[in-house]
Amino acid sequence: MKIVCRCEDVTYDDVLDAIKKGYTDIEELKRYLRCSMGTCQGRGCNRLLRQILLEQGVKEVPFTKNRPPVKPVSFFLLEDEVEEREGDENE
Amino acid sequence: MSKTVIIGGGVNGASIAYNLAKLGESVTLIERGYITDGATGKCGGGIRTQFTTEETCRIALESSKLFDSLAEELACDIELRKGGYLILAHSDKELEEFKENVRMQNSIGVPSRILTVKEIEAFGVEPYDAVGASFCKMDGVANPFKVSFGYRDRAKELGADIRTHEEVRKISYNGGFEILTDKNNYGADFVVNAAGYESKKIADMLGVSLPIEPYKHEIFATEAMDHFLDPMLMSFSKNFYISQTVRGELVGGYSPLEAEPTEDLTPTLSFAIRAKKLFEEHLPQIKSLRLLRQWAGAYDMTPDALPILGPAGYERFIQANGFSGHGFMLSPFVGRAIASMITGSERYRDLVSSFSFERFKRGVKREKGVVG
Ligand SMILES: Cc1cc2nc3c(=O)[nH]c(=O)nc-3n(C[C@H](O)[C@H](O)[C@H](O)COP(=O)(O)OP(=O)(O)OC[C@H]3O[C@@H](n4cnc5c(N)ncnc54)[C@H](O)[C@@H]3O)c2cc1C
Ligand code: FES
């Protein structure tokens, strides 16, 4: 069994199955399978997912949109960072 | 040609398509992007029955019951978890209003009740400035993607024609409807307008003016943590909600009380910071968590914050829009009610009569239980 997405436990067969059901838009496929929506936010699987779509004859496969932040940030740090920035402005 | 063309592939369009197909009706659904591309894909997944108007409570109750058997009906795990909704009251005056709401809710079968500050603590929630709360164990959360795709997959199996990546550009009426997209031309007896905040643009194509405006709402998800929060925590006066999904992520949002309509849905850093400050007062754990994603969507708001269900302008031009922040929780009901309307059944007639387009001519009372 080939794994495509480690975070969300999605296999190669799962992807083929979904494509067969008509999910050929990478954004839709991502949401249907949760593939690329795990903790690593697709860093581990997004390229594979694109590759499978291309391999299955889907012509245009755009890169998926990422939701901010680019990397997970701690809420705690988030505040510090902004207070620092606000501090800078006051100087 | 299908008897019915549905415009919009959000959870409501998908639910209507499924319910029509289940009744053996011919139906085509047209979605500009992909299924869940609109507000549905931005949604917090909350399901509740605690509203301030009786008509809304009634349809929310019906819908909440339908959710209980939906996983079985759609043969997919919709990640439903009914841990209740806990709505904080931040002043004695607000608590008095909640007591009245609970009385009304109980009278129609919604099992809500008032909580004391001690009882709030027992849910693992820091009361902070709360003086009490209203709680209903029948409320909860489910996964909007799973529900929408579940409806879409079953609808398709039952013969519904699902067209994605196709945009409706023009509609005309000449005894029947003609729907023109960027790819095709369709005829139909019924058109269902389930295009979310863009429903106004769809109705404009037929010269019907819907009182719907888009309002931006931001939302975030954290990384997963061990389960600690059972209910969806919510506040009307601070305008926030937060819940923990089956997977352990915290999903929450808040919105400024005063806002202007807009279609700009850019996520902002100031939202994340404000949200964190609001939530750490009641859930100190959040400080140590990492923010995984944040995004924004639009509520399709009517003047009374209640949906439009039924014809507008033409007898067979059916609206399923204006859902404000409640279109997901109502979708199982909406699918049934609209399908029943199209097939000429009387079953849901009384329940939906309060949500007619005509009501705006008479003047309306606003639903106050709106959040986010
Ligand atoms: C941040 C946020 C949190 C929310 N939280 C909750 C919650 O906890 N509980 C709850 O019940 N609700 C919640 N909601 C509200 C809920 O998401 C919506 O009410 C619901 O998803 C609406 O579904 P819909 O199918 O009516 O519309 P949408 O999902 O908006 O679907 C409309 C579709 O129509 C398509 N469309 C538009 N124009 C055209 C055209 N010309 N041709 C073809 N297609 C077209 C769009 O692409 C879109 O996919 C939330 C909303 C937001 C933004
Ligand atoms: S490997 Fe797919 S989201 Fe991480």
Image (cartoon, rainbow, N blue to C red):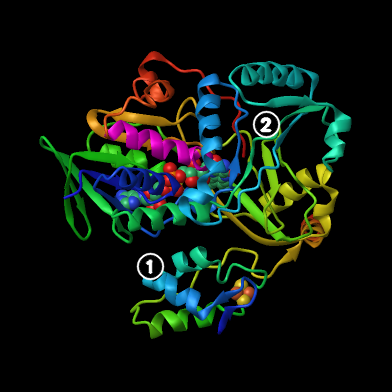
Task: Look at mark 1 in the image and give the residue it sits on.
Answer: A21
Q: Amino acid at mark 2?
A: Phe
What kind of secondary structure does the magenta stretch mostly adopt? helix
In the figure, B230 relative to B222: above or below? Answer: above
Asked if residue B75 lies left or right of residue B82, the reply is: left
**Neighbour class for label 1 at 10 Å: few (<14), some, many (≥20)?**
few
Query: Subunit of mark 1?
Result: A
Determine if the magenta segment contains residue B337: yes
The magenta span reads: B327-342
User: Under 8 Å from ligand 1: the CB of mark 2?
Assistant: no
Decide: marks 1, 2 in contact (CB < 8 A)?
Answer: no
Residue B222 is situated, as x and y percent measured from the top left of the image, at: 71, 58
Quarter of image, ligand 2: bottom right
Query: Subunit of mark 2?
Result: B
Q: Residue furthest right?
A: B118
Residue that appears at 49% across and 74% down:
A14
